[in-house]
Amino acid sequence: MEKLRSISTFLPRFQRCAAQLDRELFAQQHLEYRAGNWLRCAVLKFQNPSWINNSPKAKPFSESIFFGIWVSEESVRQGKLNYNIHALKLRELTGYRIKSREFADEFRARFKPFEKQWPNVRTDLGPLTLMQGWVHFDEDNLETLIKALSYQFLNIAFIIDDLLAVRRKC
């Protein structure tokens, strides 16, 4: 890992992974994705536009739900590739009536059958982090793991869609 110290060296690898994903397959579930830097981490972020508050006052990555795969300087030293689903400021998400704790509890109950497929996953966090985990990586398998986690997310994204559908304001 010594060769891969700076997060800036990881961003091109995340961007390359994003370019190699099957955009049409993700579009079938209305999922968009992009790689970038966020909070000094190289990140690949997935989101359905309906999971975002499009208010002009909304800040990036706020008032939304998203799946992220990322590395930080610390995780690089540990050889860990992180992933999670954040649900931020759900009460402010326009067009929905959402109680964050209730939403998190229901997500986790529906996620339970998929849990064993996600290495080192935790769901015992607060309502802002629906699930979070990590996988070991080395220089040779980073891109393979990023792509595998990306495609694995396709198997659970419907849970978020279903939970939002029943909370949509009429």
Image: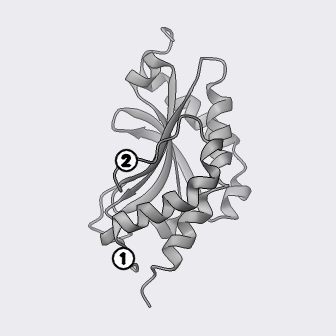
Q: x, y (%) of residue 56?
A: 30, 69
Q: Earlier in the sequence, mark 1 or mark 2?
A: 1
* Location of mark 2 (residue): 125
In the rendered view, would you say 49 is above or below 135? below
Distance between mark 1 and mark 2 Cα atoms: 25 Å
* Residue extending farthest top: 2
Residue name at image x 41 percent, y 28 percent: 72
Q: Nearer the viewer, residue 11 or 134?
A: 134
Q: Nearer the viewer, residue 73 or 32?
A: 73
Q: Nearer the viewer, residue 16 or 65?
A: 65
Numbered disc 1: secondary structure: loop
Q: Quadrant of the C terminus?
A: bottom left
Q: x, y (%) of residue 30?
A: 62, 65
Residue name at image x 57 percent, y 72 percent: 162
Residue name at image x 56 percent, y 69 percent: 161
* Location of mark 1 (residue): 94
Tell me which amino acid carries mark 2.
Answer: Leu
Visual colour scheme: one colour
In the rendered view, would you say 30 is above or below 71? below
